[in-house]
Amino acid sequence: MPHWKRNLIVLCFVQLVTMIGFAGFHPFVAYYLLDLGVETPAEAATWLAIFNSGAAVSMMIASPIWGSLADKHGRRMMLIRATTAGCIFTLLMGLARSPSHLIVLRIIQGLFSGTVVAAITLVATETPEEYLGRSLGMMQTAQFVGQSIGPLVGGVAADALGYRNVFFVSSSLMLASVIATLFFVRETRRHQQAPAPAPEPERAPQEKRAKGGALAAIANRNTLVLVLTLAGNSFAIAVLSPILSLYIKALIGDVPNLATLAGSVMSVAAFSSSISAVLLGRWADRIGQKKILVACVIGIALVHVPQSMVTHPNQLIVLRAIQGLFMGGIMPTANALLARATDVSRRGAIYGFSHSAQAGGRALGPAVGAAVANTWGMASSFLLTAGIFGVMSLLVGLFVRVNAQPVEEEEPAPVTT
């Protein structure tokens, strides 16, 4: 079996387990804050916005640094670092004694985490170009499956064991991911060649791209638009993060199985995304990533409108299941287009920059969502999300250009680490 296929299988497992761990505690953070001393749901929404935004801001600052280090020292090591940090700080969050303790730990976790971008960068640099779309689709499926299982498992565990104990379970799952990465993932080391005294004329364009560096790659129009699209996707989803669990509570009241129900609502979109991600990734390799990306963004924009009008959580579950079918196509297609627009030697830096922009969206989204909900009601946040996805569809449709041939690069010597 080629090493890139083995890596893909192991990394899919690693991302599945890691996402279960991270997603396991998210559905009930608002309720955990109430247990830690927050007095009202409105105050809980504000604290939850800080919880989400604080981690995103720290990720935004740190991600370009980690991306550049990944290009120099290896993507595998960055994945181990990110997953280990997630494990440690999730454990400590379970020991928090006040809302401020929880927020500080979450912010520090954001500085050192970033498991998704580390895994995607590793796959994007190890996978042959012709298999890039479907491979990233498989990765996205693993992440979505973890995100779909995690909230449901976490919600059930929270109702049965208490909110605090779920953090310890999540930390244990992340530890398993660290061990799997250490023992089973190998990375091809790309050696730097000494400059030739007289470069061949036909290699001049490649050398010019390499000298341009990460800043030149970022200045590329496709790269900028795709990074903005990924950031807009993170922002739009984050707008709902501080109010979704409270929205569910407002629809049904304070019922005994509230955490389980909130976990079900949050997991259903990720579950349906896991079904569509691989299929859409394969279709994108055949008919074009741009077409799938535009169709998915438009679909998500439309399905958010009726979510603002529901009267029962069951209606929300159905609509979010439909939303997930479209969500499954965004990340693999956008990341594949981004990889094709970037030289292989610079993909760590570009994905780090992209993740920083996405973290910026996640940082701004909760604050905007909480402000909009407090001003015009929680339903208005869904309409705002629909509008953001509508703008994203115009950006991709008008400004992304797809090259006939991806950037090619000489095959490196297979030296494992």
Image (spheres, grey):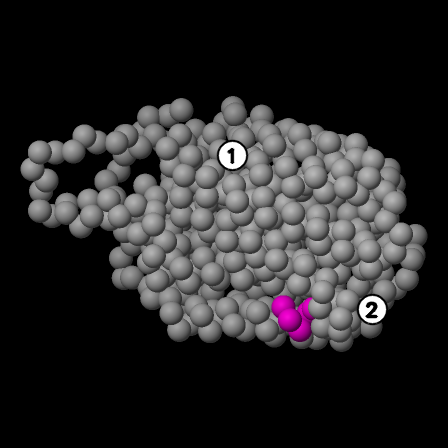
Name the quadrant of the N terminus. top left
Q: Is residue 397 magenta?
A: no
Name the quadrant of the C terminus. top left
Q: Is residue 383 magenta?
A: yes
Q: Residue at x 82, y 56 (%)?
A: 43
Q: Is residue 53 left or right of residue 409?
A: right
Q: Position of residue 334 (x, y in %)?
A: 45, 58
Q: Is residue 397 above or below residue 241?
A: below
Q: Which residue is mark 1?
A: 79
Query: Which amino acid lies under the numbered mark 2 shown in the image of this protein?
Result: His
Q: Is residue 135 left or right of residue 99?
A: left
Q: Quadrant of residue 227?
A: bottom left
Query: Which amino acid lies under the numbered mark 1 shown in the image of this protein?
Result: Leu
Residue 14, numbered label: none
Residue 246 appears in view? yes
Gap between marks 1 and 2 measured at Cα = 40 Å
Q: Main secondary structure of the magenta part?
A: helix
Question: Closer to the observer: label 1 or label 2?
Answer: 1
Q: Position of residue 394 (x, y in %)?
A: 46, 73
Q: Residue at x 47, y 61 (%)?
A: 228
Residue 243 or 292: which is nearer the viewer?
A: 243
Q: Position of residue 341 (x, y in %)?
A: 34, 55
Q: Is residue 34 left or right of residue 105?
A: right
Residue 135 appears in view? no
Q: Are marks 1 and 2 in contact (CB under 8 Å)?
A: no
Disc 1 element: helix
Q: Residue at x 79, y 32 (%)?
A: 95
Q: Which residue is mark 2?
A: 312
Segment colored magenta: 381-385
Q: Residue at x 61, y 32 (%)?
A: 85
